[in-house]
Structures are given as structure tokens and as C-alpha cells.
């Protein structure tokens, strides 16, 4: 057995709640495989508070470029507002570091393709945080569906119905195209429909609707979609920040069983339920039970998968064409909602207004249209 590599030297960019509350515990859970060596934040007070929490040995910087030049980390974790992700990801890749970035990795397909070019030039990789894919329950469900054990996937429902009030949108970068890239389609429901795509595979066609019903934002506060998958399955997707009774849910009806996941911000094995069709015998259905090992969906689980890939020098999950398909789904939903026609996978490319921006310069949705 070859020896385990030396701990990867890690830097975090952004030291707010998501980094302190999710990334730092993930790093601690992977102790022995990683060493946090640097942190970056433009807010010196927030940076100092994070360093006190993380340990004084963590060097502090107020500039990402200065940190990259001085530290040359192996891995950069990015938890800044979305509008900064592309620039910071490309800079880290050019410095030879792998990247694990909060969603969305960037705000358009054009940005994503710029990141892909930086990957190719550097040989490093950038992954986006889609932690709901990770954990034993999701892995088990995907294996059962992909193997055909549950029969052909037929009908699916994907629901992110959350509630956000006016105070939430008082934060300046929220609810604008330039800083967040969209509304709940980009910032909230993306986790759940990414998991749906992970379970069902490539999508082929989207028919969407979007509305701004309550909040005075540039972007939508609710969106819905009808989706057709390459395997023939059809699905509904709902993304809302208007729903007092909050829930995140996926249901996939296959020929031989229904698999359901109900949670809010993360899931364990107990959150997955399998219901056999009447013709399925009990012995077969018993084998569908989630595995004994219970690995929650989490930043910790995704970081572990990325480190496994780093150790072997292979592309990590949640990166490349796989992650691009999720961003393309968001762009297709917006394009369909704003143009009133179906959008097929692969049709949004250079020259298409929805390639450069999720609002597609639509007169009723682009920022200038709200002036």
C-alpha cells in the first residue's frame, strides 16, 4: 500500500457564516488529510474573528492574489458572494490550486466555460458545492436507479419550497442578477434539482415559468419547470422563497418502486423512503433499504470525495461537464420562462443572450428593464 500523501495545504476565501459554519467543520473532520494555512477576507474584523476560531497559525490576508502569491495552497475553498466566484476560481486555478467553491460556481455558462479553459491550462480542477449529492442515502438511491433495480424511472417531482422575508433581501447582493445571478432558481433550488439530475441523468428539454410575486427584486421569487429526461422520465421542479411551510423534497416513481427524500437543508439515511409496487415481493424490496453506514449529506462528505480525487489525480465529482449540466439547466429554465418556449439541452451557446447572462437581456427581466 502506498503511503498517504502529506496533508493538503488549504486556504479559504471568505470567512463568513458558510465558511465558519460548514467549511471549517469539514476541514476539521478531514484532519490528517488537510491543513488550513490561510484565510482571506476584505473585512479585517471578520477575518480576525475567523482566525481566532480557526487558530492563530492561520495566516490572514485581505487580498486573494496576495495570498495565492505568498502561500501557493494546494486547495482553495471559496465562500464569497456569487459575483466573485468566477474571478477567484480562475485566479486559484492559474496558481495551480484545486478549488471547491460554494454554489453557484459562476453566474453564466460563459463564465463556466472560462473556468473550464483555466482548468485545461493549469491542470487543476474546480468543483462546486452540491453537498446533497453526497452521503450514503443519495449514493444508494442513485445506484438503485442507475442499475435498473427499481425499474425504469417514469415520473419525478423536485420541490424546494422555502421562505425568505424582506430582511433577507436587504443584504445588498441578494436578489440582483449581477451579484447573485438570479433568484431561488440559482440560489436555493439549485441544490435540490442538482440532486434530481444526479439521480436521473441527462435532461433533454425544459419548459419553465417564473414570476416576481412578493419581493421587490430584479430576479424571480418563484419558478417552476416541466422536464423531460434522456431516459424518458418526466419531472416537475418548483423553486420558491414564498412558502411558509418549508420543505425540500424529491420523489421518483419508477416502474417497481417509489423513492422519496424529504428534508430541509440536509439528509440522512432515515430521510429516504422506498415504497414497492404491488407486484414486488418483500424479499426484493428488503434489499432496497438504505445501507447500515449512515453518512449525512454534508460539506464534509464532499470534501472527502474531492480529496480522494486529489490523491489519485483524477477529476473530482461536482466539476466539469457534470456540474455544467446543472448550470445549463438553470439557464434553460430562465430562457424558457422568459421566452415562453421549450429549451433543449445544448442549445444555449455563444451568441445566445442566455449564454452570457441568466436574464438573457429580456426587457422585462434585465436590470435595465427594472430601472
Image (cartoon, rainbow, N blue to C red):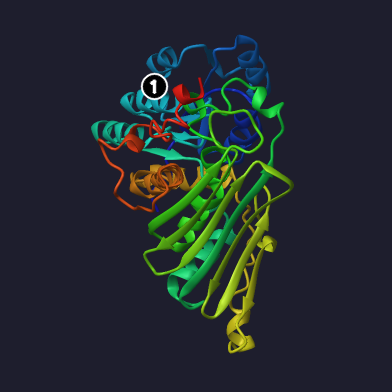
Where is residue 50 drawn, in percent x and y?
64, 20
Where is residue 284 drawn, in percent x and y?
58, 84
Residue that badge 1 annotates: 72
Where is residue 296 drawn, in percent x and y?
63, 53
Q: Is 256 situated above or below 271?
A: below
**Foreground residue among 280 and 174:** 174
Residue 24 appears in which quarter of the rendering? top right
Q: Which SS class for mark 1?
A: loop
Q: Is 136 situated above or below 312?
A: below
What is the crowding at mark 1: few (fewer than 14 residues within 10 Å), some, or many (at least 20)?
Answer: some
For the question of whether residue 265 can be seen, the reply is no
Residue 204 appears in which quarter of the rendering? bottom left
Kindly identify the residue that appears in the image at 40 percent across and 46 percent down: 332
Q: Residue furthest right?
A: 245
Where is residue 123 drawn, in percent x and y?
28, 35
**Foreground residue among 193 and 218:** 218
Horizontally, is 122 left or right of 79 in the view?
A: left
Horizontally, is 11 left or right of 121 in the view?
A: right
Amino acid at each position: 500500500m502506498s503511503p498517504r500523501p502529506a496533508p493538503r495545504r488549504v486556504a479559504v476565501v471568505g470567512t463568513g457564516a458558510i465558511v465558519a459554519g460548514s467549511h471549517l467543520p469539514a476541514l476539521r473532520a478531514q484532519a490528517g488529510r488537510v491543513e488550513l494555512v490561510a484565510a482571506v477576507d476584505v473585512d479585517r474584523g471578520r477575518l480576525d474573528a475567523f482566525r481566532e476560531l480557526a487558530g492563530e497559525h492561520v495566516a490572514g490576508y485581505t487580498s486573494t492574489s496576495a495570498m495565492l502569491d505568498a502561500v501557493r495552497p494546494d486547495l482553495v475553498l471559496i465562500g464569497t458572494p456569487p459575483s466573485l466566484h468566477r474571478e477567484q476560481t480562475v485566479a486559484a486555478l492559474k496558481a495551480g490550486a484545486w478549488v471547491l467553491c460554494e454554489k453557484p460556481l459562476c453566474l453564466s455558462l460563459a463564465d463556466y466555460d472560462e473556468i473550464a479553459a483555466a482548468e485545461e491550462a493549469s491542470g487543476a480542477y474546480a468543483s462546486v458545492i452540491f453537498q446533497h449529492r453526497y452521503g450514503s442515502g443519495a449514493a444508494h438511491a442513485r445506484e438503485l436507479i442507475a442499475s435498473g433495480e427499481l425499474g425504469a424511472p417514469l415520473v419525478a417531482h423536485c420541490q424546494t419550497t422555502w421562505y425568505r422575508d424582506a430582511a433577507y433581501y436587504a443584504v445588498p447582493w441578494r436578489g440582483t442578477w449581477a451579484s447573485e445571478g438570479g433568484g431561488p432558481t440559482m440560489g436555493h433550488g439549485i441544490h435540490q434539482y442538482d440532486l434530481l439530475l444526479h439521480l436521473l441523468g441527462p435532461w433533454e428539454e425544459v419548459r419553465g415559468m417564473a414570476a416576481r410575486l412578493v419581493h421587490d427584486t430584479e430576479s424571480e421569487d418563484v419558478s417552476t419547470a416541466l422536464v423531460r429526461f434522456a431516459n424518458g422520465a418526466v419531472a416537475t421542479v418548483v423553486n420558491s422563497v414564498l412558502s411558509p411551510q418549508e420543505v425540500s423534497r424529491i420523489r421518483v416513481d419508477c416502474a417497481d418502486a417509489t423513492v422519496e427524500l424529504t428534508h430541509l437543508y440536509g439528509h440522512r439515511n432515515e430521510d429516504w423512503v422506498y415504497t414497492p409496487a404491488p407486484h414486488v415481493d418483500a424479499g426484493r424490496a428488503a434489499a432496497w433499504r438504505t445501507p447500515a453506514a449512515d453518512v449525512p449529506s454534508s460539506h464534509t462528505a464532499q470534501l472527502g470525495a474531492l480529496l480522494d480525487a486529489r490523491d489519485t489525480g483524477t477529476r473530482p465529482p461536482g466539476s466539469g461537464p457534470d456540474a455544467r449540466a446543472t448550470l445549463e439547466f438553470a439557464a434553460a429554465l430562465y430562457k424558457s420562462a422568459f421566452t415562453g418556449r421549450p429549451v433543449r439541452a445544448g442549445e444555449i451557446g455563444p451568441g445566445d443572450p442566455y449564454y452570457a447572462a441568466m436574464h438573457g437581456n429580456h426587457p422585462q427581466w434585465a436590470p435595465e428593464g427594472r430601472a
